[in-house]
Amino acid sequence: MIDSTDSAEQQRLEAIAHTHRYVLRPCRDFSPGVMMPEGDAVNFPKIIDYFLSERFRETLIRITSGTSSFIVVPLNLIG
């Protein structure tokens, strides 16, 4: 979890999110998360592994709007 990392690591992950123009938003379990277009998940190997685990059921949020869909995943998965 990101909670156990130091503030420098959290700032690094937030900078990555900002670079990709992703929005910081809490996950379902209220851990720090990032909202991104669902199609972008393939660009992050840790997110693919996350989808294969059972953990995603506790933290993932999926948002759909018209033809667009977004997901909120734990922030540490984009690093």
Image (cartoon, rainbow, N blue to C red):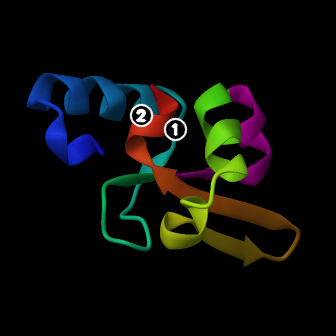
Q: Residue furthest left?
A: 7
Query: Who's the residue at 75% across and 76% down the image?
Result: 65
> Which region of the structure is painted magenta?
35-43
Is 9 displayed left or right of 35 in the figure? left
Q: Is residue 57 above or below residue 51?
A: below
Which is the main secondary structure of the residues drawn in magenta?
Answer: helix
Could you tell me how many numbered marks the image carries? 2
Instruction: Kindly check if marks 2 and 1 are in contact, taking CB atoms under 8 A apart as contact.
Output: yes
Q: Give residue 60's position: percent from left, percent from top.
A: 56, 65
Where residue 46 sits, quadrant-wise, is top right
Q: Residues within 10 Å of mark 1 (few under 14, many from 20)?
A: few
Up-down relation of residue 55 to residue 5 (above or below)? below
The residue indicated by pointer 2 is: 18
Direction right: furthest residue: 67
Callout 1: SS = loop
User: In x, y percent, where is residue 33?
Assistant: 40, 54
Q: Which residue type carries mark 1?
A: Arg
Q: Magenta segment: does it hold 42?
A: yes
Residue 79 x, y percent position in the rendering: 44, 25
Neighbor class of circle 2 (other Cα within 10 Å; few <14, some 14-19, many 20+) is few
Q: Amino acid at mark 2?
A: His
For residue 14, what is the image quadrant? top left
For the N terminus, the quadrant is: top left
How far separated are the C-alphas under marks 2 and 1?
5 Å
Which residue in the protein does label 1 denote? 21
| Depth order, front residue of 68/51 | 51
Membership of 8 in magenta stretch: no
Which residue corresponds to the image point at 28% horizontal and 23% vertical from the top-left? 12
Could you say where residue 42 lies in the image, as x and y percent from the top left? 77, 34
